[in-house]
Amino acid sequence: MSLFFEQFPIVVNSLNTGFLQTLKLFALTLLGAIPLGLLICFGSMSKILPVKGFFKLLIWLVRGTPLMIQLLIIYYFPGLVLNNPIWGGGEGGRFVASAVAFIINYACYFSEIYRAGIQAIPQGQDEAGLVLGMSRSEIFFKVKLLQMIKRIVPPMSNEVLTLVKDTSLARIIALQEIIWAGQSFLKGSQGISGAIWPLFFTAVYYLVFNGILTVLLSRLEKKLDFFR
């Protein structure tokens, strides 16, 4: 027991550092994927067939392959195949590569949620807006956008909560996020080896963070109830 109390501050400090990396990856993914997903959605709904086909193919490829494989391809392909290691070998390069992979992956999932939300709005609203002399962009941003947000918040909330846990996949390219930090004490880190409890303890971080997000997202849903 005394050994546990000796190890605890060391482990918590390392897990806090790893969790900060997890939070940064989570936040950057949302900041990039939310607007990119909307652009991909517009591309997949385009009336220009080559544009529509390209974005449909992109969505199919990203949604049809594991995120782990996408991480490996994005990080290793430029250096090993193209002989152009654009990410470098440091922690910063691994983080940027992870962020790119996560943003593209989640943008494609978000785009399908956006598309479903837009198509769920009655077509008559577009026709009424055009009769009133509004442009299609004005109809979208002034009439349909808030209604779409109401419809997409529940499925988007599920994706956001999934993203918290998916960040752990970044350890496949040795990004030092919280799971990597917890596992390092099993292999040997900072004078501690063979300790599995730090890896299990990482679950507390995920549970607390997901709990906070669940409360915040639930409140957002309630605030949008006026669209019912």
Image (spheres, rainbow, N blue to C red):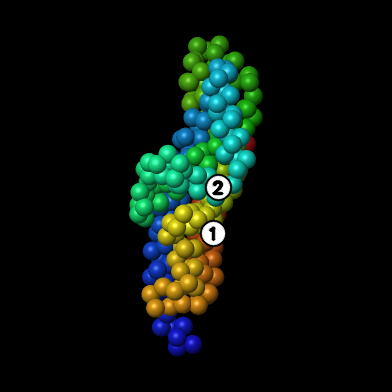
Please say if 64 is above or below 24: above
The disc label shown at residue 69, or none: 2
Going by the picture, which residue comes out furthest to the bottom?
A: 2
Q: Is residue 190 visible?
A: yes
Is the residue marked by circle 2 packed among few (<14), some (14-19), or many (20+) residues within 10 Å?
A: few
Which of the two residues, 179 or 32, is positioned nearer the viewer here?
179
Report x, y in % for residue 203: 54, 66
Which one is in front, 122 or 193? Answer: 193
Give residue 87's mark.
none
Q: Position of residue 228 (x, y in %)?
A: 62, 36
Q: Position of residue 227 (x, y in %)?
A: 59, 35
Residue nearest the viewer, comparing 216 with 170? 170
- Report x, y in % for residue 93: 37, 49
Write the residue at 44% across / 66% down: 181
- What residue is disc 1 on? 211
Callout 1 environment at 10 Å: few (<14), some (14 to 19), or many (20+)?
few
Residue 143 can be seen in this image: no
Secondary structure beneath label 1: helix
Q: Amino acid at mark 2?
A: Ile
Q: Quadrant of residue 29?
A: top left
> For this view, does 35 lie left or right of residue 227?
left
The structure residue drawn at horizontal position 36% and vertical position 52%, both measured from the top left corner, is: 89
Q: Amino acid at mark 1?
A: Gly
Relative to 143, residue 128 above or below = above
Residue at the image position 55 percent from the left and 26 percent from the top: 54
Q: CA distance from mark 1 to mark 2?
A: 29 Å
